[in-house]
């Protein structure tokens, strides 16, 4: 017996859908095919509507997804027979899958979310969906039925994390159940229907070995970053949008000792820390009355009262930069964060500007002194024209000379030509200058490991 009782089931009657006419002449073929396509599309719309009418919401909610798909496909077949709508098996399965995705998932986005090769999904209205696959952006054939369909999916995503998005609150950051990061922009700010951007959450945890395999770095660079994590160097990961900052931060966090207490601060939680003692904090937007907003700066201040060994900020954007420096300077060694910037030098300038945004009233020299004392290493990552994401700089912050922060590029990527496989070739220029944190390497017993990694990088 079907899990979906019917409501006021109608007697079988013809839907008035006859088979497509057979074209007699060459000039009639295209119009006949177009008419058949329109007729079939109308039939599918009717089938969808009838199926939704006859489904019991309580039964749908209690039915496992795999069984639900079978039940929906059976219901489609019954209604198609009753209404004399001609469907083949592929069309029945496709319509059943669409209905299940609409009821339990994210509609047409489900097929894209299940594709592990897709890293980003960008919806620019109901009929224009772009994806990034293997570092290249392309348009997808997936479509929403209309603007209302897309709006419903957006609101479902926002509601899933206790947030709302509509005309009165048209922007929203959220996340999916698997941790994928979502940004939604609603009309009237979005002119072509709701805009939806999804940065997919990798189902497989990525470590340094995987990043080497992907060509993001060489083994000596990975070894140096591993040492930086183990000897608790304060690290900033810098790069553009989609360059792989969070992925690298997750990989570096694997070097943290399991016994340490880590507090993470994020706008939308997406870090994948493997340690058992992790406290995750997430911001909260203001209510409709403009009250109750909790910013990253608020969370940073509270995090320092939670006895953390390390503080990790998903992305530093504004005045919380000052609190991050304070944490790095007051015994929370090994803290990490990411920042949007084009070079390692620009990253320091941005941090300085963010501290000034917090209206601290500090002179520039005082801010730079704080930065030079707090940050040990800046790692620059970049998405390049072949679609690859690579570490282009590993820079140490050496100290101050006058009013200028002195920096040293431990590694600097020098790109060469493109190979036959379409991938850029490059080598790292290595600096063998004595690092400013030499005493820390000695303290943790990692001086020889550092020297060996640098010698290997020069070969």
Image (cartoon, grey):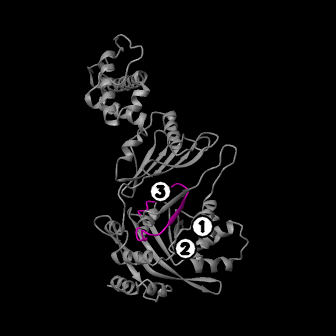
Q: In which quarter of the image is residue 374?
A: bottom right
Residue 18 shows in the view: no
As drawn, the residue found furthest toward the right would be: 361
Q: Which quadrant is the C terminus positioned in?
A: bottom left
Mark 2 vs mark 3: in front:
2
**Residue in front for this viewpoint, 89 or 313:** 313
Q: Nearer the viewer, mark 3 or mark 1?
A: 1
**Residue tagged by mark 1?**
304
Characterize the local packing of mark 2: few (<14), some (14-19) or many (20 or more) Cα atoms within 10 angstroms. many
Taken as a whole, is the magenta stretch helix, strand or loop? Answer: loop
Q: Which of marks 1 and 2 is nearer the N terminus?
A: 1
182 horizontally vs 321: left or right: left
**Stretch in magenta:** 254-274
Residue 332 is labelled as 2
Residue at horizontal 42 percent and vertical 68 percent from the top: 258
Does the residue at mark 1 contact the one at mark 2 (Cβ under 8 Å)? yes
Identify the residue under disc 3.
270
Residue 240 in view of the camera: yes
**Earlier-in-chain disc, 2 versus 3:** 3
Q: Quadrant of the N terminus?
A: top left
Q: Which dot marks residue 278?
A: none
Q: Which of 65 and 185 is in front in this view?
A: 65
Q: Does the magenta stretch include residue 265?
A: yes
Q: Residues within 10 Å of mark 1 (few under 14, many from 20)?
A: some
Q: Residue, x 65% and y 69% (percent of image)?
A: 355
- In the depicted structure, whether residue 56 falls above or below residue 139: above
What whole-number distance in Å separates the C-alpha atoms at marks 3 and 1? 21 Å
Query: Residue at 47% across / 71% down in the picture?
Result: 380
């Amino acid at each position: 017996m079907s899990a979906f009782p019917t409501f006021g089931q109608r007697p079988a009657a013809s839907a008035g859908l006859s088979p497509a006419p057979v074209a007699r002449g060459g000039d009639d073929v295209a119009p006949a095919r177009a008419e058949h396509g329109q007729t079939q599309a109308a039939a599918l719309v009717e089938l969808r509507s009838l199926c939704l009418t006859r489904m019991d919401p309580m039964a749908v909610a209690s039915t496992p997804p795999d069984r639900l798909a079978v039940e929906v496909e059976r219901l489609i077949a019954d209604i198609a027979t009753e209404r004399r709508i001609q469907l083949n098996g592929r069309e029945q399965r496709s319509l059943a899958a669409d209905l299940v995705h609409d009821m339990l998932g994210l509609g047409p986005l489900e097929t894209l979310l299940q594709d592990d090769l897709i890293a980003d999904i960008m919806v620019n209205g109901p009929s224009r969906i772009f994806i990034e696959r293997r570092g290249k952006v392309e348009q997808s054939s997936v479509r929403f039925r209309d603007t209302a369909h897309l709006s419903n999916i957006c609101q479902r995503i926002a509601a899933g994390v206790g947030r709302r998005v509509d005309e009165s609150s048209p922007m929203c950051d959220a996340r999916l159940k698997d941790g994928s990061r979502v940004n939604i922009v609603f009309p009237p700010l979005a002119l072509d229907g709701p805009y939806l951007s999804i940065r997919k959450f990798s189902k497989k945890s990525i470590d340094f070995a995987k990043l080497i395999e992907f060509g993001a770095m060489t083994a000596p660079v990975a070894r140096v970053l591993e040492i930086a994590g183990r000897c608790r160097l304060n690290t900033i990961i810098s790069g553009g949008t989609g360059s792989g900052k969070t992925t690298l931060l997750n990989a570096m966090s694997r070097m943290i000792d399991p016994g340490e207490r880590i507090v993470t601060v994020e706008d939308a939680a997406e870090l994948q820390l493997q340690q058992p003692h992790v406290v995750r904090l997430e911001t909260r937007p203001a209510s409709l009355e403009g009250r109750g907003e909790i910013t990253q700066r608020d969370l940073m201040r509270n995090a320092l009262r939670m006895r953390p060994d390390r503080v990790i900020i998903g992305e530093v954007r504004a005045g919380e930069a000052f609190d991050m420096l304070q944490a790095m300077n007051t015994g929370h060694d090994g803290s990490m964060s990411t920042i949007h910037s084009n070079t390692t030098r620009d990253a320091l300038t941005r941090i300085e500007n963010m501290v000034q945004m917090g209206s601290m009233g500090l002179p520039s020299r005082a801010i730079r002194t704080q930065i030079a004392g707090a940050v040990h290493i800046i790692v620059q990552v970049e998405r390049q024209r072949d679609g690859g994401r690579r570490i282009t700089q590993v820079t140490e912050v050496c100290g101050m000379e006058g009013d200028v922060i002195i920096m040293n590029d431990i590694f600097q990527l020098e790109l060469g030509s493109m190979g036959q496989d379409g991938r850029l070739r490059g080598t790292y220029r290595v600096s063998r200058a004595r690092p400013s944190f030499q005493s820390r390497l000695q303290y943790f017993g990692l001086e020889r490991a550092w020297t060996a990694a640098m010698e290997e990088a020069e070969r």
